Image (spheres, rainbow, N blue to C red):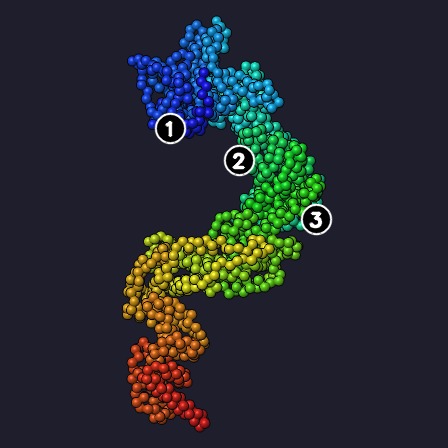
Amino acid sequence: EDDTPLDEFMDVDDTVDDDFANHDMATPLEHHPENTQKINGHDPFMKREAAMDLFPWPLNSASFPFSDIPRRFETATVDPSGSLVATTDNLGRVILFDLETNQPIRMWKGMRNCTCYFAELPCYDGRNTETGTSTRSYLVIHLRQRGAVEVYRLRQGPRVSAIAVPQQKDCVVVECHGPPSEGSRVDSFLLERIDESEENQSEGCHYIIDKLVIDDPDAVVATALPKQTPARPVSQSENKMQLKLLMQLLAPDTNIQFSSQTVLTTFKSIRALADLGEGLDALSKCDHLEREMGIDCSNLHSQAVWYCKSRLNHAKDVESEEGSGMVRKAVISELSLKLAYHERLGHAYCVLHGYESKNDINSTTGGDDQEGGGDSMEKLSPWASESLSWISAASKNDALKHRFMQSFPNAQNQGDKKPLEFSKFAMACQSSGDNDRVYLTKVKRSRLPILRRIFRPLLQDLFVFKVVNSLFGHLGILGIEDFDTLQKYLGEWMTMVATDIAKSNMSGTWRPMVRWLQDLILNAYDISQQEQQTLDDDFLRKTAKLESLMKFCMEMEDLPKAFLLAVICMEAVSSASIQLELKTYGKITQLESVQPWEDLLRKLRVCLLVSLRLAGDVSPTGGIEPLTVSSVSRPDIFSVYSWIARDELSLSHDNQVVIALESACLSSSLAFYPSTVDGDSTRRKKTIFLSCNDPRQGVSLRNPTGLTNDTNSRSLLFFLKDHARFTPHLAANRALILASLWGKTPEHLYLLKHAISALRTVVDRVEGFSLAVLVEIYQSRIRPVCRAMLFGFGEHELSEDVVSPLIEDPVWLCEFITVVKQILSMIIECMSKMPSVNASKNLEPSEMWPPLRECPVLNVLVRKLRDVQLQLSSVELHHTIFFAFEMTRSIESLESVVPSFASLFLIGTLFSEMPPMPKGSIQQKGLLDKAIVDHAEKTSGPVVDNFTRINDVVLFAKALGLDAKYVRTQYLIEMIRLGKDTSINDLLGASSPSLDRALFAEKVVQIICSRLNATITSLKSTKNYRGILSLLDADASRWVREEAAKCSPSQQHRNARASLITTYSMAMRVQSMSESLDNSLSAKSNALSLMSGTLLKAVQAQEQEAVMSV
């Protein structure tokens, strides 16, 4: 006897995966090199002294020398016939050898710490002519470490049994031979030690022994008495034949004519218990028997269940008398569970069918006797009244088809007008698997029609509403474990029920839906007390508050229906919590239970206000997320700033008008928050509904209605006034929305102009997102049009049929170029301001909901821009291109200004370093001067007090290597040349230090000379003024004439006539500026000042003399 300790087998490291999946089936023998350790250097099955006395086994000619280092065999067990031997080794392998050929024929892996045995069964195979039986051998492997016994059919058969047994030394397998009368077959027995109790330790250990039953479905045990020829056994394929016949009858495309009795007879002919369960499932879900043949499947199903129960009881009786193997035990257990499922299914259907047969299922109201009828509207609570008002308001709003269409069915399902068929009910149910509860299917589309029928009693009177509980009770889902499931079912049903039906549950004392929910709460508490389960406080509070339904309401897309369901739940919670408060001695209070529902209703009020006010367009900048309380509560989905911007644009596109509206709302004392208690008053609710019912909300954003004095229709900002403090956030969202609208209709360029106006606010009050918004609008909306305008439609970013006619329109093209220059200049300006922008502001906590928080739309743009590096040089180069194109309208001429322009206006060019632009060419200088002249000619107004209007010219000059001083000086010179001296007097005085005074003096002296020459010429042609000329110095007059002749024809053409007073004033200013310059300029300015002053005095004296003579 082997006295080696079992724990010694654990010394070897297991390199094989011990998972059951790896060795459930034996694998053909393969030779693999293994890396394992030796078992302490000796054989664990024998003592060291005995090992020294062994002699080598004599080898014959058929022997096979098996050498596989480091494999070392540990045990060897020979089968009763002497033809096979099973060995175990130190590598965790069991190898089966054929002793006739001495060849390994099979290997099992992952068999660490195991022992092998053999067993035999009598089997009919027709080869034994005397008894008709033979013997089939099996290998029994006891896995002590894992606590399992596995049986494999030999030689290459599958595993036929797997039995869980105690681990290590508490169980062993005993092998012994049977009596000679039965052929001395080898059987295996399980010997198990029972743990002794502390009281009986003195009595010693107790053991039980049980025969190892091998349940091989492919082996038919001989049961005939001696000297009797047994009947031929039924094969597995013949066993399945009856099931296949039943399946053929139940197939939807069968053409066999039969009756219900035929189906039942075929079902009863099934012999295998496992096939009975499969046939019962198929029978319950066969819909064409009812639909096409008119067979009562419910009755047929009941008879089939009764027959299965009788077969199951008989099988259990046989098992108790004769015992059975693991396979048969599993079949009996599986059929028991399946019968429990089908019994519940049949009983639940009988309840539903009985209700639908006795009641008019086309009637959905409780009739005149229902309490709350007649004057029920007068008994509505404030919350119930508000709920009906929201339903009414939504039915007249465009949000109905955009957001709530699924929850407002047009008509009742035609199939609901007659009782439900049993097969449809069965197909919508499923077993829980590990217990006898029956749930509805996980497929929501299949579950909803059944829920509509199950909960229909709640739409009638109080006398039938308990049908719902009865039905769920038969399904076995009324326990605490299914509390959340029932809430989920009710919520899903409420999404389908018609609005007018739901109104019947909003008033009266005995409302079925409220009563059912109330009973659900109290029943959960009572069950916990009866079963002596101590519920923790958190679970008890969740039960009292119906938290699963609360979560369901928060995720409902149909907001009017969510509000309705929340009101019903709050009423039920209020009634139930009053009773729980008494039962729990105040641990659960009504106020604590109802408060979360009131908060939820106020949040739903805000969501409804936004949805109806915006006519369902709650994602104006894109997005497909449904508007729910849960989604709005998340900070990364919806932007309140985007909602307000969308509402503002429906009133006006004018940026200044909108900013004035924001200021008015912020300072208004009448504004309130609907998400607080302030919004619960009747007067303020009326204000909310008037705002939602504003007929102007249906108009397009492209045609704003304008601001009016109608105080009954408040803007959305009136209810969310704290957001008015964030003007740049609102302006940025308005710009994004307007740019998106323009992208859809590019011919409406006024939308893009208004977007640029809003962007001006974003740049002036620069924030961390300002640059990201500018870049997004340019990249996504403007850049593709620029690329198509300069290089054609090869990239296919735009529709040529839509954009090409616009580019050919000179008016549209001119306005578009102006917009492009403006946004590029704003990007450059914003880049210069960004380093000084402070970090994100800390938002003060507010009592309103949604709370003040960052705008997710703008945050996405900021993160998008953060991943790339915007290049200032590239932006300036893009601006230069369009500036030059505006001047020339010739693509060929752009190459002389910016030779690398062909690679611009691609998706990534703003973020790439561009080659430096060549500077100092005559063409570039000519374009700059032409731009300055054009801006001077376009400048109008009595006073020009800044250089803002020439910012794009300054940027162009910077790209050419010239500074802003040159541009400003040339601009003032051209203004003087055009005779607009008076409009720039203040600007000239304030900007004198930032001008090129030498250039200014030189050019203005030439202009003054041209003016004086023109005045002298005019005086010569007038007889009365000829004497004045004698007062002038001849040399000075000649010099003035020569300087005037130096003007180019274009300059002479632009030189405007000016009065002597204006000329003299300018001459005096030039004289003042020339004092610090070289002597020549100073002398020239002095001479001009003297000459202009002399002429002015002489002319004034002559005119005064003429007046006096008259």
Residue 606 in percent (x, y) is at 58, 52
Disc 2 crowd rating (10 Å Cα; few below 14, some 14-19, many 20+) is: few
Residue 488 spot, x, y in % from top left? 58, 39
Left or right: 332 with respect to 598?
left
Q: Residues within 10 Å of mark 3 (few under 14, many from 20)?
A: few
Amino acid under label 3?
Glu
Q: Distance between the residues labelled 3 and 1?
A: 87 Å
Residue depicted at x 40% and y 11%: 81
SS of the residue under disc 2: loop
> Taking the image as drawn, is residue 642 in sight?
yes
Tell me where residue 345 appears, x and y as whole percent. 58, 28
Secondary structure at badge 1 equals loop
The three-letter amino acid code for the residue at tag 1 is Thr
Report the Cα–Cα distance between label 1 and label 2: 49 Å
Residue at image mark 2: 442
Residue where numbered disc 3 is placed: 378
